[in-house]
Image (spheres, coloured by chain):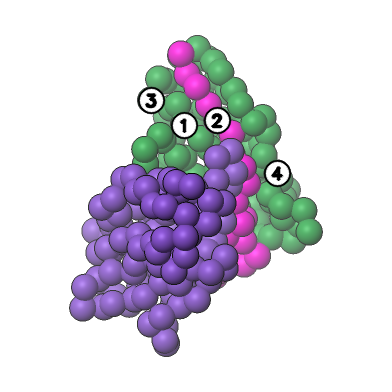
Amino acid sequence: EAGVAQSPRYKIIEKRQSVAFWCNPISGHATLYWYQQILGQGPKLLIQFQNNGVVDDSQLPKDRFSAERLKGVDSTLKIQPAKLEDSAVYLCASSARGSSGEKLFFGSGTQLSVL
Amino acid sequence: AQSVTQPDIHITVSEGASLELRCNYSYGATPYLFWYVQSPGQGLQLLLKYFSGDTLVQGIKGFEAEFKRSQSSFNLRKPSVHWSDAAEYFCAVGLYGGATNKLIFGTGTLLAVQP
């Protein structure tokens, strides 16, 4: 079974530039998550999708971050414009139904450096 | 507010020695608790989880964890550490309500294994 795919693996940009990350979840998984992991911290949920609808985006900085999952399969997370504090690893995860306690499968992440 | 505390930022053990990683949580109801491991450049992998029932939970790779409600703890243990166990370990509590399926992670404990 293929895992959660993410690209690019690394990205270096200057502040105020824009950047986009892509995630392809495990086939058949209805629920998709984007987490932000800042160095020295645990991952923090940015947004959760159930199929193509947003379930929870309470911690997404909506003035600069946006995410979409148009066909309920792969997803894109965008930052525009980027700030220095956005430097982090962005992890995508998926689960089959998003039900309580269900196992999440994580991708390897995209490491973003904002200079 | 719900939170997870991992008091040890960095731990070094000798190969073959026993290991205990500490985790304390703050949550009003009976928690769903998880331990994840993250190797360099890899995504998070689930080691084990606790929902209810037996408070001693067995996981993959020879790990176990014990839920102690009176101490609000969920410590991870392994009787004999292998060099391949060197990684970062995250404790997490699951928050569920409606369609929300959110994991709150601790800050992680980085494990180094000496030969």
Nearest the eye: A65 or B23:
B23
Q: Secondary structure at mark 1?
A: strand
Q: Colour of chain A?
A: green
Image quarter of residue B28: bottom left
x, y percentage for residue A88?
Answer: 46, 31
Q: Which residue is most to the right?
A: A1
Question: Mark 4, residues whose alpha carbon is within 10 Å: few (<14), some, or many (≥20)?
Answer: some
Q: Secondary structure at mark 4?
A: strand
Question: Mark 1, residues whose alpha carbon is within 10 Å: few (<14), some, or many (≥20)?
Answer: many
* Residue placed under numbered mark 1 in the picture: A88
Distance CA(mark 2)–CA(mark 1): 6 Å
Q: Is residue A104 magenta?
A: yes
Discs 1, 4 touching: Cβ within 8 Å:
no
Marks counted in the figure total 4
Q: Is residue A51 left or right of residue B108?
A: right
Mark before the other along the chain sequence, 1 or 4: 4
Mark before the other along the chain sequence, 3 or 2: 3
* Residue placed under numbered mark 2 in the picture: A111
Q: Colour of chain B?
A: purple
Going by the numbered disc 1, the residue's amino acid type is Ala
Q: Is residue A20 left or right of residue A47?
A: right
Going by the numbered disc 4, the residue's amino acid type is Ala
**Residue stretch in magenta:** A93-115
* Residue placed under numbered mark 4 in the picture: A5
**Of discs 3 and 2, which sits in the foreground?**
2
x, y percentage for residue A21?
Answer: 62, 32
